[in-house]
Image: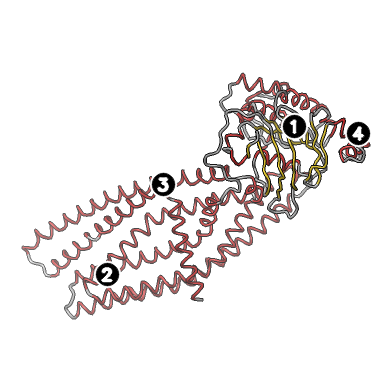
């Protein structure tokens, strides 16, 4: 048990250290706030102390003391006004601090997410990532607000109260020093016991968020298969677990709260009895008794507020920890600090003995792959599903690094380039083009936000997209809905091609760009691909072999290895070749 407590204490220190590091931009302001708060709390003692003197003067009243009492009342008034002024400046700093943190924490988190490599995003649910940021930021803001208005003032007040009580009479100080740590221990103990339950609850928050996001994102499938009730039931089940765990937590806190109240009541009673005894023994004045009771009442009340804050810290610690873990997440692809930033590239790509295994897989996606993609030529990657075609494209983008071997661009390893320096020369049109919930114009211009309308229209024309765009209600200013839900599959593909045109890439990748489309859309997209491919290094990943007959080179991948390569004519006439077999099956209609 002692070992567990020690580990928890070490973890708490680690938590606060990580949080302090997270708030680096605000460190100077937080330190200034702490100093001003200490001054403010010290200044607040002046009022009760003047009141003590006034009471003592009134108890032993003499007519000549009346002027002194009036001066003391005026002094007390001005001390309160000074306190109000200090409070004003303190609150200004707090509001500035909170608004700054509300700005830079989400911005830094979003920056972290967009710069993390695909490996992280493919292993994390979208809803989980969003809830981590939202709950993490909110809990940190709550923490800062409570720290600023509750904790720093309370700790200062407790320290000053303890010193003053010892100065007035050591027995007052000793009484407070006995009950305060006992109260702190009870608070610490209950929150340590609740830590595992809280971790489970915050994990369930993320699961619930992920479930809701998935049900809304895939709403078309949900409705098509009449699964609305199932989605509601599964989401309700997760929220029910959260509700049950939360009630257990709060009821346990309430039970321990009875113990904490008992400790505070005993402490207050002890101070009162001790004060009355000292007055009876003429060892303390009535004013001193009022002064001591005023300070101790404030201190015990503050101690209770501090315990409630600690309850909130422990309740939100799991959410903050998960947010901090996100900010500490390391990208699997490290950008070279002094990487090459090319002004132009030739566009020749070569794989040398490349091995690659996805994190969640035991089998090699690529196994000692050697291949060469010539500059300015059209190279097709074909083969059975799972053969490694898309993985090759991801390697060219350097979304992943190989475990062994190397990927070369213009005879230099991709790791030697600045990641963003070479990627700007590459564009991809995937099987499912990702469309943003904005206008057609903005979606096309995403690859080049500085492009003018004339350039956007020219790109749409090359992509054979202008015809359908002009038929939309607001043409280029038409909002296309989330993930382009208002557009057909073929229209989304043509928007993707127009986007690639506007990027003006040296290397162009079409990843199953014509699959799952009707014949008319496929012909329009093939025509656009042909126009766009001219003079560029073009890589076409395809299942339909009829779409890549004119490729300069065809590379056939199977089980992560290069099975064969050559022109369409060479491979089609190769006996017992995989390409010839696939070609034959497609002609017979047995495979797509």
Residue reaching furthest to the left: 64
Q: Residue at point 34% right, 74% down?
A: 267
Q: CA distance from mark 2 to mark 4?
A: 101 Å
Tag in front: 2 or 1: 1
Q: Residue 495: x and y, percent?
A: 69, 29
Residue reaching furthest to the right: 588
Q: Are marks 4 and 3 in contact (CB under 8 Å)?
A: no
Q: Residue 16: x and y, percent?
A: 44, 59
Residue position marked by numbered label 4 in the rendering: 573
Q: Are marks 2 and 4 in contact (CB under 8 Å)?
A: no
Q: How many marks?
A: 4
Residue position marked by numbered label 2 in the rendering: 293
Q: CA distance from mark 1 to mark 4?
A: 38 Å
Asked whether, in this view, residue 109 is left or right of residue 347, the answer is left
Nearer-the-camera pick, 383 or 572: 572
Q: Secondary structure at mark 1?
A: loop
Q: Earlier in the sequence, mark 2 or mark 1?
A: 2
From what the image shows, is residue 296 above or below residue 443? below
């Amino acid at each position: 048990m002692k070992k567990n407590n020690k580990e928890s204490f070490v973890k708490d220190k680690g938590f606060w250290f990580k949080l302090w590091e997270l708030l680096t931009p605000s460190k100077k302001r937080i330190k200034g706030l702490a100093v001003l708060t200490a001054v403010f709390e010290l200044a607040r003692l002046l009022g009760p102390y003047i009141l003590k003197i006034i009471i003592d003067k009134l108890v032993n009243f003499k007519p000549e003391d009346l002027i002194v009492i009036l001066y003391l009342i005026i002094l007390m008034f001005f001390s309160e006004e000074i306190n109000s002024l200090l409070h004003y400046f303190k609150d200004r700093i707090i509001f500035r601090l909170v608004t700054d943190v509300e700005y830079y924490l989400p911005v830094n988190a979003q920056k972290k997410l967009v710069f993390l490599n695909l490996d992280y995003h493919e292993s994390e649910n979208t809803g989980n990532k969003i809830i981590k940021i939202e709950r993490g930021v909110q809990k940190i803001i709550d923490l800062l607000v409570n720290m600023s208005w509750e904790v720093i003032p309370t700790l200062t007040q407790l320290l000053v109260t303890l010193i003053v009580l010892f100065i007035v009479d050591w027995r007052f100080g000793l009484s407070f020093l006995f009950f305060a740590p006992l109260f702190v221990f009870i608070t610490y103990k209950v929150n340590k016991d609740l830590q595992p339950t809280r971790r489970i609850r915050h994990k369930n928050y993320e699961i619930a968020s992920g479930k809701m996001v998935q049900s809304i994102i895939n709403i078309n499938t949900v409705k098509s298969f009449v699964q609305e009730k199932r989605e509601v039931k599964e989401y309700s089940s997760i929220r029910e677990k959260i509700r049950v765990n939360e009630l257990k937590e709060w009821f346990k806190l309430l039970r321990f709260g009875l113990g904490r109240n008992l400790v505070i009541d005993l402490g207050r009673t002890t101070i009162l009895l001790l004060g009355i005894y000292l007055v009876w023994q003429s060892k303390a004045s009535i004013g001193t008794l009022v002064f001591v009771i005023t300070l101790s009442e404030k201190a015990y009340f503050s101690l209770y507020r501090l315990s409630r804050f600690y309850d909130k810290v422990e309740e939100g610690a799991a959410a903050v920890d998960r947010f901090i873990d996100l900010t500490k997440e390391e990208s699997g692809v490290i950008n070279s600090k002094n990487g090459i930033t090319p002004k132009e590239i030739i566009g020749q790509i070569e794989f040398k003995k490349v091995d690659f295994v996805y994190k969640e897989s035991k089998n090699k996606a690529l196994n000692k792959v050697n291949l060469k993609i010539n500059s300015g030529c059209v190279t097709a990657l074909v083969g059975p599903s799972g053969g490694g075609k898309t993985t090759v494209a991801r390697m060219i983008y350097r979304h992943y690094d190989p475990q062994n071997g190397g990927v070369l661009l213009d005879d230099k390893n991709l790791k030697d380039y600045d990641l963003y320096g070479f990627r700007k020369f590459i564009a991809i049109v995937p099987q499912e083009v990702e469309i943003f919930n904005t206008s057609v114009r903005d979606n096309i211009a995403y690859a080049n936000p500085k492009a003018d309308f004339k350039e956007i229209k020219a790109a749409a024309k090359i992509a054979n997209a202008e015809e359908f765009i002009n038929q939309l209600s607001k043409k280029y200013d038409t909002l296309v809905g989330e993930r382009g839900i208002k557009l057909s599959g073929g229209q989304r593909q043509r928007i993707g091609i127009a986007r690639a045109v506007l990027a003006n890439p040296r290397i162009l990748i079409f990843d199953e760009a014509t699959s799952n489309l009707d014949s008319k859309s496929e012909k329009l997209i093939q025509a656009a691909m042909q126009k766009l491919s001219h003079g560029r290094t073009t890589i076409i990943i395809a299942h339909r072999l009829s779409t890549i007959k004119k490729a300069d080179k065809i590379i056939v991948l199977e089980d992560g290895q290069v099975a064969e390569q050559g022109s369409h004519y060479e491979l089609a006439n190769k006996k017992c070749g995989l390409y010839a077999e696939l070609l034959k099956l497609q002609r017979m209609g047995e495979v797509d």
